[in-house]
Image (spheres, grey):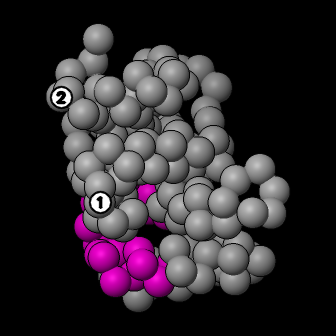
Amino acid sequence: MTGREEPKVNDLFFTCSLIEYIASKTKNRRSDVVNALGYGRLQKIYELADVYHSDNIDRVSDDFIAEAGILQGDFDNIAEAKYSIPSHWDMGRVYKRLVVGIARERDMDIIEALIEGYNSFVSGKIDDYNSSFYYDNPQNILNAYLYGEIE
């Protein structure tokens, strides 16, 4: 292990941050971006994250937006935010922790867990920047996913 976390966990962090970046850039829900990218592209991003991380995120995002045919949407949780807005790196960290937890608890492939997490009701709650849920304890966010309710 190099650094504070396993390299593949860091690759997942980049993957989730790129999803956030693309979603914000195209004004789409995070689940819509994940579904448009699909398992194959998500796997590619995850596997090559160390390479993509060294490149300009605007170029990388533009390439995947074009390749997946992601159109401009009308979901703008940034414009609706009344308070300070977390960065794509901040949100990548939130989703990374959720995905790692789902994969561990459900004994799932990491990309399947990613797709599950982003398509769950929890994703909508995380993406509401006017609530405090996105910066809640990572275990509470995972528990909300696992038990289907927010305590």
Residue at the disc numbered 2: 148
- The quadrant where residue 67 appears: bottom left
How many callouts does the rendering have?
2
Residue furthest to the top: 151
Q: Residue at x 27, y 18 (%)?
A: 150
Magenta segment, principal secondary structure? Answer: helix
Dot 1 crowding, Cα within 10 Å, few <14, some 14–19, many 20+: some
The quarter of the picture where the N terminus appears is: bottom right
Mark 1, secondary structure of its residue: loop
- Check disc 1 and give the amino acid type: Met
Tell me if residue 12 comes above or below residue 46 in the rendering: above
Residue furthest to the left: 148
**Residue 100 or residue 23, whichever sits in front:** 100
Q: Indicate the position of residue 85 as horizontal and vertical percent values.
A: 61, 33
- Residue bounds of the magenta highlight: 22-45
Q: Residue at x 50, y 21 (%)?
A: 136
**Image depth: mark 1 or mark 2 in front:** 1
The quarter of the picture where the C terminus appears is: top left
Q: Indicate the position of residue 98 as horizontal and vertical percent values.
A: 43, 42
Q: Is residue 34 magenta?
A: yes
**Residue 140 or residue 28, whichever sits in front:** 140
Q: Indicate the position of residue 36 as horizontal and vertical percent values.
A: 29, 72
Residue at the disc numbered 1: 108
Q: Residue at x 66, y 60 (%)?
A: 6
